[in-house]
Each structure stands twice: as C-alpha cells, then as structure tokens.
Image (cartoon, rainbow, N blue to C red):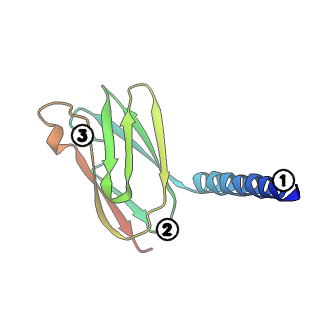
Amino acid sequence: MRKPSLRLGIAVALCGVLALASARSTANSRRIELDARKFEFSAKEIRVKKGQPVTLVLRAKDFAHGFSMPDFNIRADFIPGKSVELTFTPDRAGSFVFLCDIFCGEGHGFMTGMLIVTES
C-alpha cells in the first residue's frame, strides 16, 4: 500500500520542480517583442545567445498571421488584439529562418526573418 502513495508523492514533487524550473526560465528569459503586419515582421533579424532563454512576444497588427521557426520546432498563430508568448532556449549557434505560415496575400513569401544565435 505504501508504494502507490510514495509514487504519487514523487510524481507531485517532480511536477512542482518542473513548474518551478519553467517559471524561473520564463522569469530569467530575454523578452523580444515581434509584431506582424501584412508582409512584414517588425524585426527582420533577432540576435540571441546560445543557452539563454528567450521569450518572443508575438502580436498581429492587422489580421491573423502565423509564426514558424522550423529549426526549433516552434509554431504559433498571431491573432489581432492578443499577445502570444513563446519561450524557448536556443541550444545551438547559427542562423535560423522564421516565417509567416498563414497566407496573407501576394507579398506573403517575403514575410521572413532570421534568428541569429551566437555562442556568447
């Protein structure tokens, strides 16, 4: 009878530790605001450091847009009037494309940017 309650206790403690780690990661992250409007992001280039948590605050200025950064498996929808926060920690250095993945008109193909992750 003690084993199930011990397992439950361990599971609850582990959930608490993971939630605390996630909250600390968000609290210590670098916040970057990124607005989307027809055919462009407010920043064409974002520079961050490898291993530093980053929170992207995404906002749509006109209508729905998508945000995709395939190299980090990150995807979200920008919805007018709402902010969406994506927190991640870049685990490798390099240049990585981000793009709008919801068709927004003839200039949609130009709605891209670059995340540049440096070693330090």
**In the image as oriented, which residue stretches furthest toward the right?**
2
Q: Nearer the viewer, residue 6 or 57?
A: 6
Label 1 and label 3: CA atoms lie apart by: 54 Å
Find residue 78 and report its horizontal and vertical position in percent: 37, 34
Q: Is 91 drawn above or below residue 41 in the view shown?
A: below
Q: Nearer the viewer, mark 2 or mark 1?
A: 1
The residue under label 2 is which amino acid type? Gly
Determine which residue is flagged by label 2. Answer: 51
Is label 2 in contact with label 1 (beta carbons under 8 Å)? no
User: Which is nearer the N-term, disc 2 or disc 1?
Assistant: 1
Mark 2 surroundings within 10 Å by alpha-carbon count, few (fewer than 14), some (14 through 19), many (20 or more): some
Give residue 3's quadrant in the image: bottom right
Find residue 39 and report its horizontal and vertical position in percent: 20, 37
Determine which residue is flagged by label 3. Answer: 40
For this view, does 23 lie left or right of residue 53? Answer: right
Residue at the (49%, 68%) spot, across then down? 51
User: Which is nearer the N-term, disc 1 or disc 3?
Assistant: 1
